[in-house]
Image (tube, rainbow, N blue to C red):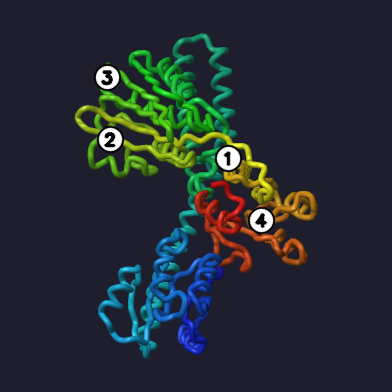
Amino acid sequence: MMAEPIHFLIVDDTEDNLVALEALLRRDGLTILKARSGAEALELLLAHEVALALVDVQMPEMDGFELAELMRGAERTKHVPIIFVTAGSRDPQCVFRGYETGAVDFLFKPLDPHVLRGKADVFFELHRQRNELASALRLNEIFVGILGHDLRNPLSAVLAGAQLLERQVSGDAQLRTLQRMTAAGNRMTEMIEQLLDLTRARLAGGLGFLRTRKPLDVRALVERTAEELQQSHPERQVVVETVGDCSTVGDADRLLQLLSNLVANALEHGTAGSPVVVTVRGDHDEVIVQVKNRGTIPADALPTLFDPFRDRRRTSPRSRGLGLGLYISQQVAVAHGGHIDVASDAGGTSFAVRLPRRMNHAVAKDVERAAKILVVDDDENIRDSLREAFEEQGYDAVTAADGREALEILHDGAQRPDLVVLDLVMPAVDGWRVYETMQADPVLSKIPVVVSTSNPAGAPSGAVVLPKPLKLARLLATVAGLFPRHART
């Protein structure tokens, strides 16, 4: 397999310097991007993943330091290594300012070719190794997702057969054996669902953790969770206390999964005979759910408590399973715009789920119509999550499940969008075909396209590229930058 080209950015307001640096650093496998101003550099950084930026300090309008500060302030570029180049004096204050803005090195002209090549090669190799590791991890996660998906059907058949035999068997010993088989099968089913959730989190940026946004009452979800778990733990007491208005907008099924994980953990790991207290409080800006028990988590285990596949035996020797429950719970909270905090001491352990109070808002009928966004993705969960997220921001959003459906919408003048969010890998007609068709049409070629891909270097050069896993906040910010007047503030 041919290695992906590495992108390297050179920023200098003098054309001769750009040509000289390009000639000095040109080699196979390296794509050199050139910018003659800070503004032009930012445009290139928006479209390409860059392994290293070689930036001239002294430029008109926006100097190198100002460019570096803007790069460090953006999620996409804050980790790009920057080497400053200057023909000025070796002023220590200038050098200090360069390092303060996040530079990894500071070079003075005239440049030593061997030194420059050596320094650049270090960062090119680090970038290559990082990409190889990311690809390996992604392949592993895809394998886990496919394996989990394919295991569900035969496991369902085994469980159905065991449950059928339970109704036909009369002997107590045989019935106990079948019940143990059913219980084990149910645990396996839960593990498979957790593996699939892990794949969603890593490959889809957690978008699968929020399938819908509907009005809900968190108090009712907590009461339902407590009632169900109380039946399976009759020896323990679950106390529910509520204060204030606990309504918000979200995915009720996913929030039930989160609450069930936390309350079940509190019942499993708490001190025997002690109650689990669940408090739901609706404040002005958020709804807070606090789950308390009298168990204690070791202090050295707290920093990694929400990590996937953590060693749960550090927190409780009775733990079973994959160690994904708390990780998935945190992902569900994050998908809803919230988070989970934990505190533990001699007095007990408390998990606090903080969910922002959000309500469905009708899109205002403004004089200027809302921008229409077409979301093209073959994953139904991602399509629905993005559509609802865009609608919540005041956009008019439509979806397409494949490239063929997207092209039908694009060629329909009444439905034609102002922007397309496009997945490249789809069955039948893929995203590349959609993009190429758009570029060949004088009208459609003017529509901005945002592409989400795990291979940014191989994405269409004219599209705005966001790497996978896709971060919803970053996508919304990118679209807001393209249509600032349409986004709801």
Which of the labelled discs sits on residue 272, or is there none?
3
The quadrant holding residue 262 is top left
Which residue is located at x 48 percent, y 74 percent?
Answer: 38
Q: Nearer the viewer, residue 245 or 119?
A: 245
For marks 4 and 3, the one nearer the N-term is 3
Q: Which residue is mark 2?
A: 343
Circle 1 SS class: helix
Image depth: mark 1 or mark 3 in front: 3
Instruction: Say if mark 2 contacts mark 4, CB within 8 Å.
Output: no
Q: Which residue is mark 1?
A: 150
Circle 2 SS class: strand
- Judge whether 401 appears above or below 54 on screen: above
Instruction: Say if mark 4 contacts mark 3, CB within 8 Å.
Output: no
Q: Nearer the viewer, residue 69 or 256?
A: 69
Query: Percent from the top left, x then y, of residue 115?
Result: 35, 84
Q: For the residues marked 4 and 3, what is the alpha-carbon distance in whole angstroms?
A: 57 Å
